[in-house]
Amino acid sequence: MYAVRAGGLTKRFATTTAVDGVDLAVAPGEVRGLLGPNGAGKTTLLRMLFGLVAPDAGSVELLGRPAADPGGEALRDVGGFVEEPAFYPYLSGAANLSLLARLDGGPSAAAVTEALTRVGLDGRGGDRVAGYSTGMKQRLGLAAALLRSPRLLLLDEPTSGLDPGGTQAVTALVRELAADGVAILLSSHQIGELERVCDTYTVMRRGRVVWDGSATELICAAPASAYALATSDDEAALRIAAEHPGVRAGRARRGGLALALEADRLDGFVLALGDARVAVRRLDLLASPLETMFFALTADDAAVDRLEPEELAETVLAAS
Ligand SMILES: Nc1ncnc2c1ncn2[C@@H]1O[C@H](COP(=O)(O)OP(=O)(O)O)[C@@H](O)[C@H]1O
Ligand SMILES: [Mg+2]
């Protein structure tokens, strides 16, 4: 049985088709990343899964039950939030969680404390939510979702607004829950944030699924990684790059060189530079294979593998 199974999901607004014939499945214990730039349709898709908006076409099943009426049986064992989780600002985080717990039939005060601890908010639970940072509200949203001991978590951009430490804490928690068999669908417009947490990805662009598969498949399909390179002799480095298949180099607008490298080409190229007495002064990874793939899939015009290295690097720099 799938935790989420959606087929042909479609939602039209006056002028846009926000979600256009999307198929999606998430199994128990699977962490699936729902990726796409702003406006791709991620939130609308999650709203339909929650029953917050009615689809124009298609079907949804959550934990084997058809999703229909909001607040009904369909959402039993389902937790999460869309866009920003909302709370009473003048109450403390702990008081907000206690209210929610009571609505759900009342886990104990200990459950509230445990949920706050799991998201790293212990010690701040007594503070008013009005004084919370965006990241703290995200964590409280996650704590609220955990209170229900969900078997399915639907999280809309759970890492947005978090500092790197916060992102790491959320990803660790997500992996822990998945190890316990919880199915998790989480969205992001930044693939880098999800790179270490997802088993599978659904990549959306303008309402449609443009890619669907495992993290490994995504890396294998990635066209190239982008690097910024500074050497003691850029002229010579360009000549050497031209002699290496799978290595494309050009001058970057901001100085130095931009490189696009297919997988496994880096060592050979750097060793060749050394053999030619060209010193590498700086080599920065601008985009991992996953990031490059994400740009290629969601770029508005050219596919990244057709871009010149300089354009590739500039595209990546502009988007990061
Ligand atoms: N309530 C709405 N009314 C009209 N258009 C909407 C509404 N909600 C979303 N859209 C449009 O649907 C598209 C997808 O939006 P959204 O699902 O929020 O994307 P994402 O979460 O990926 O950024 C966008 O073009 C957005 O402007
Ligand atoms: Mg959104």
Image: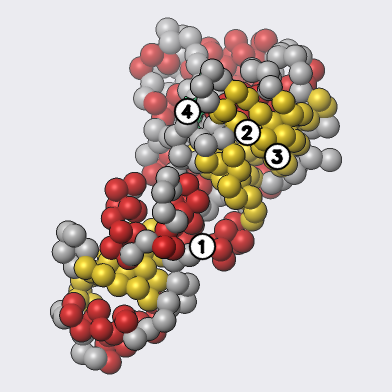
Quarter of the image where one finds residue 242: bottom left
Q: Residue at x 39, y 44 (%)?
A: 164
Total numbered labels placed on residues in the image: 4
The residue nearer to you, when weighing 107 against 156, is 156
The residue nearer to you, when weighing 67 against 21, is 21
Q: Position of residue 47 (x, y in %)?
A: 61, 23
CB contact under 8 Å: marks 2 and 4: no
Q: Which mark is residue 23?
A: 3
- Is the CB of mark 1 within 8 Å of ligand 1? no
Secondary element at tag 1: loop
Q: CA distance from mark 1 to mark 3?
A: 22 Å
Which mark sits nearer the N-terminus, 2 or 1? Answer: 2
**Left or right: 165 in relation to 152:** left
Q: Is residue 149 visible?
A: no
Farthest bottom residue?
275
CB contact under 8 Å: marks 3 and 2: no
Q: Residue at x 47, y 32 (%)?
A: 39
**Left or right: 101 in relation to 5:** left
Q: CA distance from mark 2 to mark 1?
A: 25 Å
Q: Residues within 10 Å of mark 4 (few under 14, many from 20)?
A: many
Q: Residues within 10 Å of mark 3 (few under 14, many from 20)?
A: some
**Left or right: 158 in relation to 198:** left
Q: Which mark is residue 20?
A: 2
The residue type indicated by label 1 comes to Ala
Residue at numbered disc 1 = 222
Q: Residues within 10 Å of mark 1 (few under 14, many from 20)?
A: many
Q: Which mark is residue 309?
A: none
Residue at numbered disc 4 = 138
